[in-house]
Amino acid sequence: MLYSLSGNQAEMEQSILDGAMLAIHQINSRGGVLGSDIQVAIYDDHSEVSSTARGVDHLCTTENVDAIVGGYTSAARLALTPAIHANASLLMYPTYFEGEETDSRIFYCGAAPNQYIADYLAWIAGTLGRRVYVVGSDYIYPRVLAEAIRRLAGSLGIEIVGDRFAPLGETRFESIIDDIDRVRPDVVVCNLVGADSTTAFYTQHHLVGLTPDTVPIAATVTTELDLAHMPTEVSDGHYMVATYFSELSSPVNDTFRRDLAQVRGQRWSHAAQIGAFNAVHALALAAEQAQSLDVDALSRALIGIRFEDNPEGAPFYFRANHYSSHPSYVGRAAGGKYEVIADFAARQPDPWWSGSRPPAPVPPPAGRLADA
């Protein structure tokens, strides 16, 4: 496990680690993998991107791990990838991200943008309005999302009335909020990254009198962990898209939430945490299918497995490009959580999707939540 367990990323990444550790607890309680318990080595990179490659080296050479589940930010993933190759290891990357890459030694356990943004924008256009203001952190993921939104806008009848970026970690949004108040879009699509930025932006949006009834925020990154930092009068009524929300109603998710609280003492759950949970279960299934912990054997077997107890509401599996299948949902913030108000069928992951047209839908696998 390679996560930031101290420093400014610690809250988010500890919660992601909790998902992976819950999966290990479940697997070991059923007899482990190939007759033995899973052994865990954890490396804390202290929220320093420069430490991630050292973490991979330590885990592979000192701890002799068979695979690594970890990394959260795109900067961390890009920094540790050369070390994954140098150590001939395997990375299970847990979170949704910008796509724009494939790698023979990385399996992507979160969604690529094409798996949710087209449906989300169509829903926004039909439900909230077509005059859209886009705001994001000046970072890889928000830049790619903004480009996808621009390319899709015409086909959906959307007019981009503003497009602004703020430095990563920014908390002063007065000029952007003033511009939004002046333009009065139908909706603000928010791709801000990090609890400090999202809390500041939502709060300043609220303080100038903008509300979900007048100018709602439709986010792509504001998780329930972020909501926990805001008063409910600031967050209630705004929207988010994700492949998972804690309020999804299904026996599988009920079991996950119960076990997460009992085993890890974790109140919050979110998509990246589910990615880490699914990653560990997928590795265990692949090892049993391959009857081996050899990295190449695991990599081949991962393409063929299906994890049926995915809390997202559909079986979890990888396609040949190492990307995984996901449904997606729209949530509306209420009382510090997201109520699920719309759901979309799984779409084939396409990391190189240009955003010029919606990707073809795929039939939902058996077990997908209906009418969530």
Image (cartoon, rainbow, N blue to C red):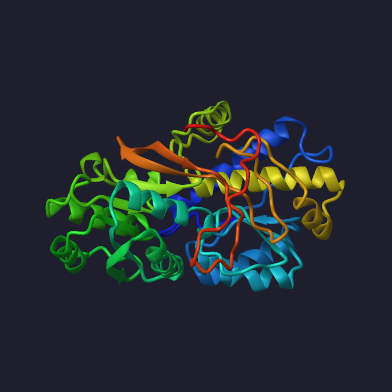
7 vs 278: above or below: below
Q: Nearer the viewer, residue 42 or 255?
A: 255
Report which quarter residue 345 is drawn in: top right
Task: Residue 343: give x, y in percent of width and height.
Answer: 47, 40
Q: At 39% across and 37% down in the image, what residue appears?
A: 341
- Up the image or down, 280 lies above or below 191; here it is above
Q: How many marks?
A: 0
Q: Which residue is located at x 76 percent, y 58 percent?
A: 64
The image quarter containing residue 349 is: bottom right
As drawn, the residue found furthest toward the right would be 291
Q: Position of residue 238 (x, y in %)?
A: 29, 45
Q: Residue at x 87, y 46 (%)?
A: 291
Residue shown at 29% from the left, 49% from the top: 128
Q: Position of residue 226 (x, y in %)?
A: 36, 49
Percent x, y for residue 251? 56, 26
The front one of 9 and 187 is 187
Answer whether residue 152 is visible to the viewer in this image.
Answer: yes
Q: Can residue 220 be seen from the camera position used here? A: no
Q: Is residue 82 above or below residue 195?
A: below
In the image: residue 309, left or right of residue 4: right
